[in-house]
Image (spheres, coloured by chain):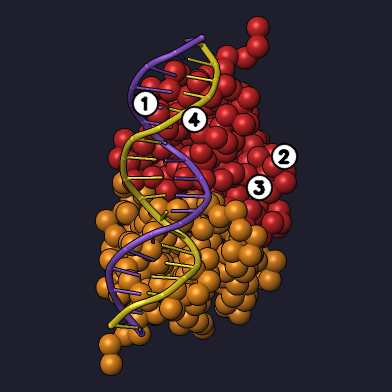
Chain colours: A orange, B red, C yellow, D purple
Amino acid sequence: MAKDVRARMVEAAVRLLATKGLEGTSFADVLALSGAPRGSIYHHFPGGKDELVTEAVALARERAMAYLEEQAGKPPHDIAAAFLDLWRSVLTRSDLGAGCAVLAVTVATDDEELLARAAEVFRGWRSRLGTLLADAGLPADLAARYAATLIASSEGAVVMARAEQSMEPFDLVAEQLLAQLTP
Amino acid sequence: MAKDVRARMVEAAVRLLATKGLEGTSFADVLALSGAPRGSIYHHFPGGKDELVTEAVALARERAMAYLEEQAGKPPHDIAAAFLDLWRSVLTRSDLGAGCAVLAVTVATDDEELLARAAEVFRGWRSRLGTLLADAGLPADLAARYAATLIASSEGAVVMARAEQSMEPFDLVAEQLLAQLTP
DNA sequence: GTCTATACGAAGATAGAC
DNA sequence: GTCTATCTTCGTATAGAC
């Protein structure tokens, strides 16, 4: 069967949030991108936009988490490189138009609940990345510091690359980050 | 004489952009925070919101640039620490409510001109920070890489700290960044 | 320079028919 | 489940008086 309408809408929301921001993402956009019928909005999301955005944040979280899981067992350098590649592909596949949906929500919401969800995502990524690096041999405290830096740098570098419409800042940052793991 | 009304409005816009995002910042908010009279909007900013936001981005740029200039002549570690302190104070003084106005504009605008202004800011910071570090003794290519990473990390760490409502991610990132400059 | 009043459009949300 | 129509709110912007 065709992909579930609700799932398609959440998927579209992630893309739109990453591209146009929280307030820039309207139901009209979500319907247009997902091809969902108008009546689906409050049928599938009785909680309205908040509910849709919450689901989108959860999806963005799970996507990255699943990808991180695939890197288990690799050396620290490869794990970091994989995480950077994830963001590099977001930039290149969108022609430098898209970024991180979770970041977009964080800087634009005034809803405590939604902010807490975003926090959960960052904490989750940070925690899992940290344990992966520790399992790969890095001392625990260094792994935690590096994980936080890798995520923060990636997020910031994506924003800079979008603004400058150039991969240069991202590539510089990626090089600097990976250099710390190649002795 | 009292601070110029126009200047107060731009100042308020920077604060609001950093706190509530681009679409979350309305003229009503700007008037309330700046104490400017209603009639001042299109008198001082005939170009409307775009003009106000453009000015706000320019102010944010100049603020950080002037601060960077004060660090000239210091060793690389101190320069980096000063840049991090700038963002730390943004977070602490706002009770983890504010971030970077330029980032907020970047992820929410669909105006090419405004995006280009934001890009100019990031490029400007990156360039000046790079030359400061190079003047302080770092090899030019390493200085450029480190400058890009410092800015990207700071921006990302500020977002994470806001989301998590905790300085922990920021402190971890700051520690990791400074460790690279203390041999 | 600053005011009020108002036009205009966008977007979220609700109601009720099919 | 999906549709249309409508309500409401809000924010930008304009017009014209003081």
The number of numbered discs placed on residues in the rendered structure image is: 4
Q: Position of residue B170 (x, y in %)?
A: 65, 53
**Amino acid carrying mark 2 in the image:** Arg
Res B47 label: 1
Q: Chain of mark 2?
A: B
Under tag 4, what secondary structure?
helix
**Amino acid carrying mark 4 in the image:** Ala
Res B56 label: 4
The quarter holding residue B169 reads bottom right
Q: Is residue B36 visible?
A: yes
Q: Earlier in the sequence, mark 1 or mark 3?
A: 1
Q: Chain of mark 3?
A: B
Disc 1 to disc 3: CB gap under 8 Å: no
Q: CA distance from mark 1 to mark 3?
A: 29 Å
From the image, tell me which residue sits under label 3.
B97
Disc 3 to disc 2: CB gap under 8 Å: no
From the image, tell me which residue sits under label 2.
B93
The local crowd at label 4, few if under 14, some if 14 to 19, many if 20 or more residues have their Cα within 10 Å, is many
Q: CA distance from mark 2 to mark 1?
A: 32 Å
Q: Horizontal placement of B117 versus B93: left or right? A: left
**Amino acid carrying mark 1 in the image:** Gly
Marks 2 and 1 belong to one chain? yes
Q: CA distance from mark 3 to mark 4?
A: 18 Å
**Amino acid carrying mark 3 in the image:** Gly
